[in-house]
Image (cartoon, rainbow, N blue to C red):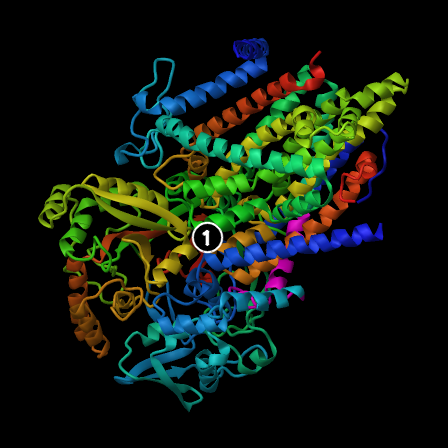
Amino acid sequence: MPNYLLTRIGESLLAIWGVVTIVFVVTRVLGDPAVLLLPIGSPAAALAELRSQLGLDQPILTQYVHFLGQAVRGDFGNSYQYMRPAMSVVLERMPATLMLAGSAIIIGIVLGGIAGLLAAIKRNTFVEYIVMFLALIGQATPMFWLGIVMIMFFAVNLGWLPTGGYGSFSNLVLPAMTLGTFVAASVTRLFRSSILDVLREEHVRTARAKGLRPKTIYVWHIGRNALIPVVTMVAILTAELLGGSAVAETVFSWPGVGRLIVQSIETQDFPVVQAAVCLVTTIFVFINLLVDIGYSLLDPRIRSHGGGHE
Amino acid sequence: MSESRTVTRSMLHAFLAALIRSKPGLAGAVILTIFVLAALLAPVLGLPDPVKGDLLARLKPPTISLSGFGAHPLGTDQLGRDILSRIIYGGRVTLMIAALSVLTGGVFGVVIGLISGFFGGWVDRVLMRVVDMQLSVPLTILALLIIASLGPALHNLVMVLALTSWVQYARVVRGQVLAVKSREYIQSARAIAAHPLRIIFHHVLPNVMTPAIVVLTLELARIILLEAGLSFLGLGIQPPDAAWGRMLAEGRTFMSTAWWLSVFPGVAIMLTVLSVNLLGDWLRDYFDPHLEG
Amino acid sequence: MKFHARPSSTSHLAMLRTAFAASVALVALSASAEAASLTIGLSSSVNSLDPAQAQVVQTDLSTISELYSSLVTRGPDMKLKGDLAESWAAVDDNTWSFKLKPGIKFPNGEALDAAAVKWNFDRVKSPDTKARNKLWFDPIKSIEVVSPTEIRFITDKPYPALPAQLSMFYLLAPKWTETHNPILEAMGTGPYDLVSATPGDRIVLKAKKDYYGAKPAYDDVTLRIIPEAAARMAAVEAKEVDLAFDIPVADVARLNKENGLAAGWIDSSRMMVLKINTLKAPLDKQAEVRQALNYAVDKKAIADAIYAGASTVSACQLVSPQYFGFNPDLKAYPYDPEKAKQLLKAAGVSGKLDVELEVPLGRYLAASDLAQIIGQQLSEVGINAKIHEMEFGAWAKKYAGGDLGNMALTGQAWPTLDADGLLSLYDSSNPTSYFKNADFDAALAKARSTTDVNARLEQYKIATKIMCEQAPDLFLFSQPTTYTHSKGVTWQARGDEWVRASDVTPAK
């Protein structure tokens, strides 16, 4: 087991390195930050001076080596826009993103779990149709559209909740519901079909043949096996929400990492983009490790047949 | 040879007969067919130019009513362009992008997932690290980064969307393969040393189609929506071409002044996603090997 | 608050309801607390509070202007007035003298006198500071302390726009700056003190008790960053925000009809143009082809449609009437597609003329709509404009790298509201001018060599006329500044992008 863990951690570091490298290359192709940092009409000499200040005049390989050396220590240099360490700019935004992503995932799992289970149990009834229809609508609605409609309805027409911003619990409700709706819709559909799949599987029949009580079948075999794809999906969604809720964060003026990344791409603030993506990647790789452990707990066969990461 | 043709034909008959028996499946197929046909036939439908606007006729409300279609059935947009025409022409772009990206990403992802899950060992490990790498970057951000640096051209968009989607198939398919692999018949096929490809095609692939189709329907929806999201962040299809996501994103500015700008493209997206899902659910049931015999 | 576990199924509902009521109460509370205060909604975030690094007027500079003093400042009437300076005058062609208000002190007791002004100037000029806006102060050679209340600026050659430029020069406390980080913290002599700054969310300000100038109407000011236009409007409609900018033009009429709200627009100092690369075929050789472009577009109709009439068509020049150097003799090219076709034919263009039209995103109001409609009108005279939308940063890289496409939609403004700066963007020595005309360069140089107002105006008349004829732009119209506010406040609308709490007063 310790060997397995070490290998996994080594592989995870490799994955992080890959992502970091890709981001480094892409940001370098992106544009020339000097142009955006100086006032319009700046002479070429001033631009060249700023590029050399930022180290952008060095050969790309030199920049890369320097960058890696610093990145290992969590130092991504100073943000071009904010003029202070990029990592601290990102870390300031992290609590907002964690709070939003966490709430959305919880809402999504609880809501989607219940709905998916309900739809699977009440197969071919009115309940299933309603649940699945709502899930479809939830999945087919673009997030920014849903967000704007939510603001108009709950904040403007009813005046119950603030339109956006950050600080108190009431600020969290609308963005979390918007993101949560999307997560719930995905979880509902996948959980339902996954339960139905497992229901048909042979070992359930076998279990039934052995004369176990139906309740035990549900709780153990079905619950456990049906959760595998759901766990996978939630892990994927978590990564997406950690850095990718840019749309919801923009609509609700939520000062999170997603919006910071989008804004930093616009202003070509390379250090911030790099720091943010690296941080999100690291967090995700860690989550992924937990998921793998979760996998083997949920499905012992993966362990015993040497399929997983052993 | 003629025998195999007969077999194919009878399979097709069975397929169609089953489709017609299923109400949701049929509904999905019909809606999707209408959208695809409309998109294909757009130039011969006698629609107004979807690109050319009339500034004097901008933001006109829908004229459709019980008494007829009127000049602009679904109204006009902020540049005075006919929305119905833009939705139909936009369907060409949207459906093509979605189909191309889903197919590219799907084929690639399923293959990777099969290989990874079936062979295991170091192959699995390397592939899963690549998947991890891909999954560790938030996909919207990755798409944004790439589009921002390469420019929002159509082929870049397809590439990026495919890139954001193949991992989903790969992981889900791999997970399923692992579960399927442990079943007795595969164990025994391996025991009699059947060729790996043979095992994949005969035993693994049919079992894996179910989750792959589910993911495909989820992905198709996601890709149409991601296109909308990219448009929202300013990196969608190049104008003046219409695409539903872009129309919706542009229309949001007019949500309180001219609802029809965002509602109709939204409905088009929703109907498409809905029909694809209905069809997908039915396909899943139809191909499910457990229900046969 | 205490919850008692109740086994009934209604307990969850009850709990939910309680939680909900609590959150509603919270909102109500904050709303009533805000009644005596002012909240302004901005579309992009404030990045740095250091005066030496700020160059975006609407966000960074406006916020800094609440916290720090400048020598002179521009009021909502577009006129310069003294802030720290009591008076100023040109001593000779190359020297400006500023008399300062005596006895102004920073909250920590440091004096804001001529020596402090000189220290600030030296700080901006010093290479160690890496000031991003150093360029603005390049023409100033040195600064001289005459007495604690008088300071002189010495330039190489006449620099008539100097007072206007100094309205963007804000003054830090020298000793305080040594031990603090002015990017994040603030301690100045402006009307407000910084209470807190939450990056990407809000900046909270409190009025200074002992401010030397006119006391602003609001004690508590919050600047909220709300990037999405629909959310910005919603925040005003929900009475969370008193004043917001950059709202869609189409919503102005709707918001005006709403209870307790007002909305409007004002011409901004930013002129929208299609910048033409006159160094790149096929728009390089003949001015007639570029003139044809100007004839082919119905500027008025587009401004009416896209900007709802909230815009003024350019009088065939980059300079709008707000600027010093506006040429009243020039008239816009009329909309005349036939004339455009004739010009193209005379210039030997046969068949379709293919040109690129680059559209940077996220900077200009309805840029994509403008590009599409212009492209369509150009196609009617046989010019096939292919639209390339791109991220602003990616476009700026091409633009600065000498790789501009045939045409690009841009908005051009100069913060000093002086033709000197604005027209210098087309001086052939400028790497981004994409325009070479010796007579134009000469007129600019002559204008710059004197402080005589009439002589300068004469040269700008020459320069703008050349530009009109040579058409290195397809001149469009001004970009409107749109705003909406609650009827509880009055905002002195201004088109130069400054957002200042002191321009806002409670409505009578």
Q: Mark 1 points at which residue?
A: B149
Q: Which amino acid does label 1 sit on?
A: Ser
**Position of the N terminus of chain C by quadrant:** top right
* Residue A168 placement, left or right of C339: right
Residue situated in front as seen by the camera: C331 or A248: A248
State whether residue C349 appears in this view: yes
| Residue A87 part of the magenta segment | yes
- Which of the pair B159/C490 is nearer the observer? B159
Tell me what residue is drawn at x 43 percent, y 31 percent. Answer: B259
Figure check: B290 above or below B189: above
Quadrant hosting residue A90: bottom right
Query: In x, y percent, where is residue C256?
Result: 40, 42
Q: Position of residue A243 (x, y in %)?
A: 61, 49
From this viewpoint, which residue is outermost toward the bottom? C146
Q: In this view, does B219 lie to the left or right of A15?
A: left
Q: Which of these two is toward me, C134 or B46?
A: B46
Looking at the picture, does residue C476 appear above or below residue A51? Answer: above
- Can I make out residue C82 in this image? no
Would residue C12 be found to the left or right of residue A74 on screen? right
Please name the residue shown 60% across and 53% down the image.
A257
Which portion, as a residue range, is magenta? A73-99
Protein chain holding label 1: B
Give the image quarter of residue A275: bottom right
